[in-house]
Image: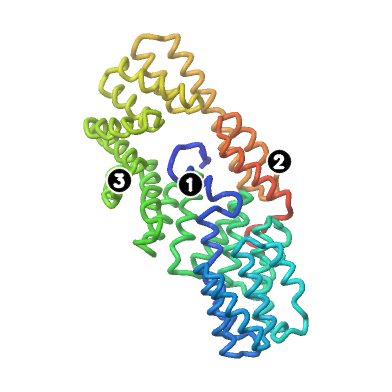
Amino acid sequence: MTATPLNDSRSTRLRLGCLVGGLAVLAVALAAGGWWSGLGRRAEAGSPANGALATEAWEAIDRQDAAAARKAIRSLRERGAAGLAGVVQARLLVARGFSRPALDLLAALPADAPGADDADLSRFIHLVRGEAAYRLRLYPLAERELTAVLAATPDSVDAHRLLAAMTYDAGVIPAAIEHLEATARLAPDDPRPHRLLGLIHNDYERYPEAVEHYEESLRRSPDQTDRDEVLVELVGSLVKLHRHREALAELDRLAGGDDADLLRAECLLAIGDRGAARGIVNRILEISPDDLGALVLEGSIDLEDGHPEAALGALERGVARYPKDYLARLKLAQAYAGCGREADADAARAEAERIRALRRTFADLHQDAWVSPGDADVRRRLAKMAADLDRPDLEQVWLEAAAAVEAGRMPATNRE
């Protein structure tokens, strides 16, 4: 099945914020949390007091309380736990955006510092160094550090999280899926890996799998922070599968919003309730007169009502505002034909076909990127095609993905 990452679904728009540059909100959240599990309990000669201080510092970092973290770090140093204090301080630097100084600090840790030869402490040095390198886009270094963590601890959820983020950055989708699935297995209460897996499968038109992942994310955390966004993404996948009544049932769990309302209108139109669909579309266009989805739906309703002349206004406005949208062009051709304007219909149909051919090639290139994790050229070609399709957002996504691949070897899927 080919991907069509130019659809106007919520998942595609959110994906633009997740794919490159640290995965914006979602994957940065995936790369955080749960890091400290067990380090403090066993590092620094097994001192319970030191472990408690390390945990205290780490929790302070998680809640962005730098003062409390520094206080705990000072206490660790006073107790002679220099190695542990250094790792915690480095992680604080990473969390505050100072990844380069964090790497310098880790490199300067004395080899004879108390606890420096502890296996757990060494693993967490690799982990913190790996995150710092990832945030600096030093991908070869990040890969080496995180691979070292997995070599010692194959079930390190934190290493899998970061590798998922890094491979997703580079558009190395099979590896990203592998690490996300491992993260989901190792963190059975965390809804975020399945949410991102849903996004990935949605973007690549693997809608049945997307639905399963979204549902699992919501099962794990029905009241998660991004609940409404996940529900909208789930509904979008159900609509693509023509499961409109199921989609409407899910929409009833939402308070509303433009994305949800537009999906509801699409479902109502699909089951034959054109009047209700039109009412929703009219409300959206009153607030957002250039909303492409609403314009296309308005034209579609007019066409189904047998009024092609009425459809022309909305569809011509949509094409003028979004000249590279395939569906708007196709619907416009149908409206022209219904009005007896055959020459205009032929021209609109030909342009729609040209756009569809571009999209098909674009989708095929995505499949090439999927199976070619080390191919920067295919990612540059995707960037060029995105520019041809008037999608500068996707152009930037793939330019940065190409740069990520060129920065060094990306982790391959199924690496032993």
Eyeballing the image, is 232 above or below 348?
below
Camera-side residue: 74 or 2? 74
Instruction: Please state which amino acid type lies under the numbered disc 1.
Output: Leu
- Residue under label 3: 256
Q: Quadrant of residue 82?
A: bottom right
CA separation in Å, label 3 and label 1? 18 Å
Instruction: Please state which amino acid type lies under the numbered disc 2.
Output: Asp
Task: Label 1: state its secondary structure.
Answer: helix
Eyeballing the image, is 120 above or below 343?
below
Picture coordinates of residue 181, whole percent (x, y): 52, 62
Eyeballing the image, is 49 above or below 238?
below
Image colouring: rainbow
Picture coordinates of residue 253, whole percent (x, y): 28, 52
248 sits left or right of 134 in the view: left
User: Which label belongs to residue 377?
Assistant: 2
Q: Quadrant of the C terminus?
A: bottom right
- Residue under label 1: 14
Task: Label 3: state its secondary structure.
Answer: loop
**Crowd rating for badge 3 (residues with CA inside 10 Å; few <14, some 14–19, many 20+):** some
